[in-house]
Image (cartoon, rainbow, N blue to C red):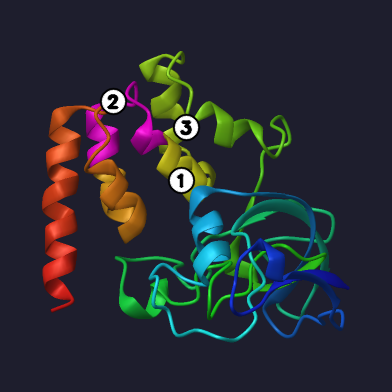
Amino acid sequence: MRALELRHPWGTANLRLVEHPDPVPGPGQVVVRMRTASLNYRDSFIAAMGGYAPNSDATEPVIPLSDGCGVIDAVGSGVTRVAVGDRVAPLFFPHWIAGPPSEEVLAGALGAPGGAGVARELVLLGEGSVSKVPDFLTDQEVEQFASMSTLTDEILRLIANNRVFRKNYTVVRNLLNNPKTPLDVSLHMLPLINVMDLKRLTTNKNIPETLRTTAQKLHRQRQESKK
């Protein structure tokens, strides 16, 4: 299969199209044939630096991009949640299946050092690390709807309350940055975003003041917990 690799010292000039062996699913695993992939701000940051920090010491090649959509190409033994031909989206945190976030489940986020992304033809994942995509929506529509301030509160609330959509990190981030998203919905989703996106929310003057100040408090807590 073909894949994009980002190599040290990073930057788009160091992107290479390479060949990798086709993955074979083991028990409980699935192979997704990617149809689309999107470039978000976080992916651009990683392409430029290889990680979130300017002094990142990561040097291993990275397969970039974290958001995409594809179809199940093959399944391993014991897989019951999806079948060959199902349209799915890989989860941004493939190890976060249930429960509160922890350092262990947040490790291996797609498209960063330690977690190969979706810029490849075939992606090997656990069956619990993909979500089915509704047939009535295109791969890009839900992500775009979540950022539209012209939608009613009711529609934005429906998107936020949909379990499949809520597992799409881009949808969550777009809803939080959308000034029309109901405040109770935004506050409930706030702990789901990463440090970089949380920091950007603290200076976003388009969102409600309550959400911005809560984001500032959460950002300070996360910074203090690292000390």
Relative vertical location of residue 133 with respect to residue 191 in this rendering, above or below: above
The answer to whether mark 1 and mark 3 are in CB contact below 8 A is no
84 or 160: which is nearer to us?
160
Does the image show residue 227? yes
Which three-letter amino acid code belongs to the residue tagged 3? Ile
Instruction: Give the structural element (helix, strand or loop) at label 2.
Output: loop
Q: Which residues are magenta?
A: 175-187
Determine which quarter of the picture holds residue 203.
top left
Provide the major secondary structure of the magenta segment.
helix
Q: CA distance from mark 1 to mark 3?
A: 8 Å
Picture quarter with the C terminus? bottom left
Q: Which residue is mark 3?
A: 159
Q: Position of residue 187 (x, y in %)?
A: 23, 40
- Name the one closer to the observer, 18 or 95: 18
Q: Tell me the mark number nearer the camera, choosing from 2 and 1.
A: 2
| 94 relative to 132 in the view: left or right | left
Q: Which residue is depicted at the point 72% across and 34% down?
A: 138
